[in-house]
Image: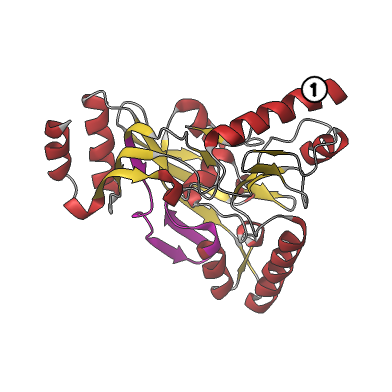
Amino acid sequence: MNDFYEELRTILPEASIKRDEPMERHTTFRIGGPARYFLIPETQEAFIRAAMLCRQRAVPWYVVGHGSNLLVKDEGYEGVILSTEGLQSYQTEGSRIRAEAGLLLSRIARTAAKKNLTGFEFAAGIPGTLGGAVVMNAGAYGSEMKDCLVCARVLDREGCVRTLSLEELELGYRKSSVAAGGYVVLEAEIRLSPGDGEAVCKKMEELARRRKEKQPLEYPSAGSTFKRPEGYFAGKLIEDAGLRGYRRGGAQVSEKHCGFVINRDRATAKDVRELCGEVKRRVLEQSGVELELEVKLL
């Protein structure tokens, strides 16, 4: 891989190339072994060139934003992690905000409030980036990204940059054409509505209060661990199966909200996988409902 490293250095400064980087530093679960290479391109052009180099050299690669919906195996990742954390520029024009994929949703929400724009309050407490939110049509408190998205600029598998309209994004519950097509979000545009900045801030504070009351924010986690089964709530099914507080190693079903698996005490990825497997087995046995992981496994 030395030749590959030298090629990377023609694209990125040495400070943007980390070798054997522990992924526990880059996931909200605080779990994960080392990535062979962890790259932080600071421009979309550099990001695209790095991705295409991986493709040309047949080196496995994976894109990570804030790592808020990701479980990385304990052995790490024998390939390239392309981080979007260097892609954080944004522009506002009227009621529209156009931002790069690595910008945190919380920062966009604060920007909207300062510009007296409403419609993005729901995303203020989601611990992820704009790119990840587009990929999974992130949502909370009755609103989703599809309610405000206009379009997204993506990199497709062939290395072509395309702009997808809201219709072409095909957003549904935790799905999109971006995920289905294996595309990478480079930037996106949202459209909000005129509002009162003070009222927007108050609403975000209220949602933050509700989130803190109901979710185990005091422990590392990847948010909601399982997708919501049609007609049910995953947390309720898990509680009904007698699994509140259930532990496997350092991983635990949250006692505050059974829909969350938390890193209670130096959990490993193996702990989390085994716990989730047991949860799925017992919920299916108890209710006949098969849970599906929302957290991505790498």
Query: Which residue does the numbered mark 1 point to in the structure image?
Result: 284
Q: Residue at x 77, y 62 (%)?
A: 213
Q: Residue at x 13, y 37 (%)?
A: 7
Query: What colouring style does the render use?
Result: secondary structure
- Label 1: state its secondary structure: helix
Quadrant including the N terminus: top left
- Residue 77 pos. (x, y %): 37, 33
At label 1, the amino acid type is Leu
Q: Residue furthest front?
A: 249
Q: Is residue 53 magenta?
A: no
Q: Is residue 298 visible?
A: yes
Label 1: how many residues lie within 10 Å, few (<14), some (14-19) or many (20+)? some
Q: Residue at x 41, y 39 (%)?
A: 33
244 on left or right of 225: right
Vertical order, 208 against 198 (above or below)? above
Q: Is residue 105 magenta?
A: yes
130 on left or right of 258: left
Q: Residue furthest bottom?
A: 198
Q: In the rendered structure, which segment of residues is drawn in magenta?
A: 80-106
Vertical order, 129 against 75 (above or below)? below
Viewer-closest of 31 and 202: 31
Viewer-closest of 33 and 169: 33
- Residue 206 pos. (x, y %): 74, 69
Viewer-closest of 141 and 255: 255
Viewer-closest of 215 and 84: 215
